[in-house]
Amino acid sequence: MYVSTSRLDPATATKAVEAIVAEARCRNRAAGVSGALLFTGKNFVQVLESDDAAIDSLMVKLCADSRHENLIITYRVPLRDRLFADWEMAYSGAAHFVRRRVVPLLDGDDPAEQRRASLALIDIMYHFTKK
């Protein structure tokens, strides 16, 4: 899981994120990656699931993507079971209401709090996919 700060123009962000999701779904399907994305209007939060090599390759691309900045990996563990196995990229539109839950991810001073905040957001994202 990572969090980053959007560099998208707020006036066109909704359409831009929809295009990002469509592209990610195609690429993730080909790479064997599943996951979920939250966009708060200010920050991206993304969970990615695959083998280490696929994740590492994808993270290099994500770190170089000019549509966001300040990418922080907040939670990384070996994959046992996929939470988003049915989704190349789960996304249900802008989620402004979770913005306050993203703030602890941005402050890397307390790893335990960052882990708790990451797990709470993963749970929210998982429940979005089960509507």
Image (cartoon, grey):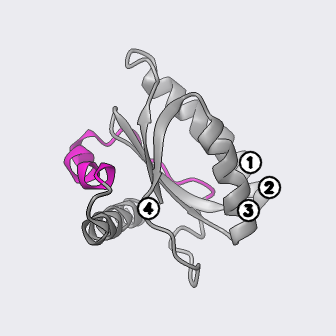
Residue 6, by quadrant, is: top left
Rate crowding at label 4 as few (under 14), some (14 to 19) or many (20 or more) other CA atoms within 10 Å: some
Q: Amino acid at mark 4?
A: Thr
Circle nearer the viewer, 3 or 4: 3
Which marked residue is nearer to the observer: mark 2 or mark 3?
3
Q: Check if mark 2's residue and mark 1's residue have beta carbons within 8 Å.
A: yes
The residue under label 1 is: 27
Dot 3 or dot 4, earlier in sequence: 3
Of the 4 image quadrants, the one containing the C terminus is bottom left
Residue at disc 4, secondary structure: loop
As displayed, is residue 41 above or below residue 58? above
Residue type beneath disc 2: Ala
**Count of numbered circles on the image:** 4
Q: Which residue is mark 4?
A: 129
Q: Secondary structure at mark 2?
A: helix
Question: In this orientation, does residue 22 appear?
Answer: no
**What residue is at 46 percent from the left and 25 percent from the top?**
7
Real-space Cα separation, disc 1 to disc 4, in angstroms:
20 Å
**Magenta region: which residues?**
88-107
Identified at 34% across, 33% down, the residue is 42
User: Which disc number belongs to residue 30?
Assistant: 2
